[in-house]
Amino acid sequence: MLLTEFNPNAIRSEFPLLTREVNGRPLVYLDNAATTQKPRTVLEALEAVYTHYNANIHRGVHTLSQEATQAYEEARTTVAQHIGAPERESVIFTSGATAGLNLLANLLTERYLLEGDTVLVSEMEHHSDLVPWQLNAPRKGAKVVKIPITDDGALDLEQLQALLHRERVKIVAVAHVSNVLGRVNPVAEIARMAHAHGVLVVVDGAQGVKHGRVDVQELGADFYAFSGHKIYGPTGVGVLWGRRELLEALPPWMGGGEMVGTVSFEGTTYADLPFRFEAGTPPYIQAIGLGRALQFYHECNQQAVSEHENRLMRRGYEGISQIRGLRVLGYSPDNAGILSVTHPKIHHYDLGVLLDRMGIAVRTGTHCAEPLMARFGITGTLRASFALYNTEAEVDTLIAGLERAVGMLA
Ligand code: PLP
């Protein structure tokens, strides 16, 4: 199904969940930054493993194990192609973006940080790319310092430059795309600035991986982490990609089966990439599902998908900004398919509850980005986030729903 002419209505029929009703209304699912719904082809791929060739991978001489191993390793190749990784061995399957970022915070701290060093973390970062640094950097007497953002929601590159000069920085951690604002950070430029100071760049790709073409080499990232469930794949699987020589220089992380060379009480040796960081039974069925999800995403034409999502975002912005009192936080037409809405008097939670009664699913709260909320002096936002199966009619339903909800609550 290669769709050059992108047609969300045709695509919707591939997603069984989208046909359900909520509170007697057709579901309008606009919580895609939290998780996406799954196409039939992914559900079928998962079922096929369970009903046809389920067996633990890498450990069996028997046919089922070999078939499952082959499908898992093919999924690794698909991921490598999706993110432009130069080789498949530097793609590590994890349980999600959070797991990958925690692995990095632990191991980069161990390997690189010294007393008095600094880790720079953006002010718009998800807690998954902030708290792991706060947990680990102090172990070595290093500190975590924020890269501020401007009033319009952009990362302040002048401040970043000043921090790179002023502090003894070893690591910069930044989201590819903000999960609150939808802001697309200029990762390639950030990487150039950081690398000029010999600083490593960790990119949280949880939202960026589904925004058009991703090429980790063009981005200049040293590490890139994401979750499968945000890009039409299953939960419980994610990816950590790293530059090979950097991954090879890291000590092992979790110990267990498959990550070893030989084991004895006298001394243990460790496996090569990627298995060195995949201790125990990996989420191989979910990884196979993720591989299928990425193929589906490519068949839909990823560039057309991101243009479609942004068209919906712009339409949403235009409608929502006409509604008295509503403000879209950090909006730019170049943002990536996310709208974060606030009202000076009405609580975002109340708006979200009323929308739910109309069958519209949005997210409310701090979106695991409390420092960003503090930056703007707010307690939270109502977030609508778009995916390839959303339609203009759904955006119009959201706008009408918000107008009604504001009218009821103001
Ligand atoms: N980073 C960003 C920008 C996110 O939006 C999220 C999830 O919302 C995460 C990290 C964490 O992803 P997960 O909970 O799948 O590990």
Image (cartoon, rainbow, N blue to C red):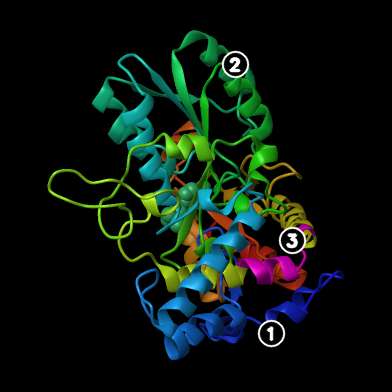
Per the rendered image, the range of residues in magenta is 294-303
Q: Secondary structure at mark 2?
A: helix
First in sequence: mark 1 vs mark 2: 1
Q: Secondary structure at mark 1?
A: loop
Label number found at residue 302: 3
The reply to whether residue 14 is in sight is: yes
- Residue 57 horizontal side relative to residue 390, left or right: left
Residue type indicated by callout 1: Ser
Q: Looking at the image, do the residues carrying marks 3 and 2 touch, with CB atoms under 8 Å apart?
A: no
What secondary structure characterizes most of the magenta part?
helix
| Most foreground residue, 112 or 305 | 112
Residue 337 image-quadrant placement: bottom right
Counting from the top left corner in percent of width and height, residue 388 is at 70, 67
Identify the residue position indicated by label 1 in the image.
13
Counting from the top left corner in percent of width and height, residue 277 is at 38, 50
Residue at image coords 66%, 64%: 387
Residue 290 image-quadrant placement: bottom right
How crowded is the residue under tag 1: few (<14 C-alpha within 10 Å), some, or many (20+)?
A: some
Identify the residue position indicated by label 2 in the image.
161
Residue at image coords 33%, 54%: 259
Residue type indicated by callout 2: Gln
First in sequence: mark 1 vs mark 3: 1
